[in-house]
Amino acid sequence: MSDFSAEFSRNLRASGVVGAGGAGFPAYVKAQGRAECALVNAAECEPLLKKDQKILEYFPGKVFDGLELMMKAVGAKRGLVGIKKKHEKVILRLEEIAKSRKNISVLEMGDYYPAGDEQCLVYEATGRIVPPGGLPLDVGCVVSNVETLYNAAFAPRPVTETFITVSGAVRKPATFRVPVGVTWREAVELCGGATVKAPAYIDGGPMMGKVMTDFEAPVVKASGGIVVLPKDHPLIVKKAQSRPVFSRIGRSTCDQCSFCTEFCPRYMLGHNVQPHRVMRTMLFSSGPGHKLHSQYGLLCCECSLCTLYACPEGLNPREACVAAKADLRELKTGFKNSSLNTGRAPRVHPVRDFRKVPVSKLVKRLGLEGYNKDAPWTEFSYKPPRVKILMSQHIGVPCVPSVKEGQRVEKGAVVGDVAAEKLGCPAHASISGTVGRVNEKYVEITA
Ligand code: SF4
Ligand code: SF4
């Protein structure tokens, strides 16, 4: 690792920069790798979410600064911003800025889902297929989210704010930044509140996000946004299905048509993901048949296309894959030690280009046409009375609180950290104030 990579990686860790696309992977780890191509994932294909586009529209220079730092750290010869063609105005601006930056260009992509899946993005940008169970680094690429690079440009300044979109059934959909640790209820109230009597919230986008039961839950560094919908909206009902319910319905209804597999973006890339075979596990209570078919879910990226778009019976193969992965984790089986790991190089399906799912069709299928509006950039400058800083906002080992009740902290102070040799990064106070409750899950701060 070069001196620059080591220093940049230290700065990223100190500032607590994590993958802001939802995953929360500590960014310093990526900066320690070697890659020929650094990609900015600006595809943002989740319907209704706009935060990456707004960051690129209002703060493009900072994202380019972060990209240049990442390129230098990993030794990349080129940088690519992967963004959908439909964002013409933003693309013009990015191309203008790219002229003054070395080896950076814009990759225009079609408006389909899930263009932002990092393995799909790597293939579109380079023609390379990430090996099954592998990482983009295995094919010489490093992929970072727009907000991650924006934050990287400021490192070692601590990450104390996060960008979010609030959309759906709210009075004034908006994209804005808030201190980490405000509640989702506060974020929705900033947008004028819900327009329906009995709202339900999806944390994240309609496709990959989860239905929330606790509106007082705090916004975290990896949060992308929230979609508010009526509680009885079919998308909420489907997402809230429990395992016994989707298993019972799946067992009696799945006709093994395999549409779920035929539309799966990872299967189309040549990975052995076959959700229709995972659905077969519902016919077995346990035993070898269960395990064999469960393995076909191991490489599922949980994009939800099979469940929310492909299945003609309205079943839930995505959750079947999620459950299968959890079962196999208990048995200590991952892809690498599964019987599907043949070592053969994946080959892209010949009809992949014709099976791409346009986002416009997806929005109709999800019943979101009435909510598919702009969420304009808004500066609220919101000063919350209290924040709750979660100790687990990243992939890896949770932070251990480093402050005590009653202690005074300034904005940006470390309130929890992870041992240097473990995967993880510190959490910071997002406001100045007095520390309230402290436990292994969170640190509360009152202004
Ligand atoms: S698409 Fe639906 S019905 Fe067909 S195999 Fe998949 S889960 Fe079963
Ligand atoms: S959620 Fe379904 S479509 Fe998406 S990767 Fe998993 S199996 Fe494939």
Image: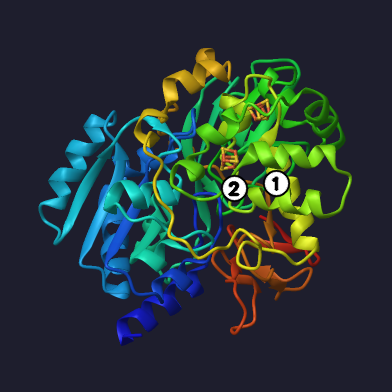
| Residue 441 image point, x, y percent | 77, 62
Front residue of 136/363: it is: 136
Indicate whether 168 appears above or below 269: above
Residue at the spot x=74%, y=15% of the render? Answer: 197
Q: Quadrant of the C terminus?
A: bottom right
Q: Is mark 2 within 8 Å of ligand 2?
A: yes
Q: What is the secondary structure assignment of the residue under circle 2?
A: loop
Residue lying farthest left?
99
Front residue of 443/255: it is: 255
- In which of the image's four quarters is ligand 2 placed? top right
| Residue 384 image point, x, y percent | 62, 46
Q: What is the secondary structure assignment of the residue under circle 1?
A: helix
Residue at the spot x=42%, y=29% of the render? Answer: 355
| Residue 142 image point, x, y percent | 37, 63
Q: Quadrant of residue 420?
A: bottom right
Instruction: Estimate how packed mark 1 is, as few (under 14), some (14 to 19) or many (20 or more) residues with alpha carbons within 10 Å.
Output: some
Q: Quadrant of the N terminus?
A: bottom left
Indicate whether 14 appears above or below 105: below
| Residue 156 image point, x, y percent | 42, 72
Q: CA distance from mark 1 to mark 2?
A: 8 Å
Residue 283 seen from this side: yes
Residue matched to label 2 = 300
Determine which of the numbered discs, if any, sits on residue 322 in the image.
1
Residue at the spot x=62%, y=61% of the render? Answer: 335
Determine which of the numbered discs, if any, sits on residue 339 in the image.
none
Residue 154 seen from this side: no
**Chain-order first, disc 1 or disc 2:** 2
Indicate whether 340 appears above or below 349: below
Front residue of 52/256: it is: 256
Q: How is the image coloured?
A: rainbow
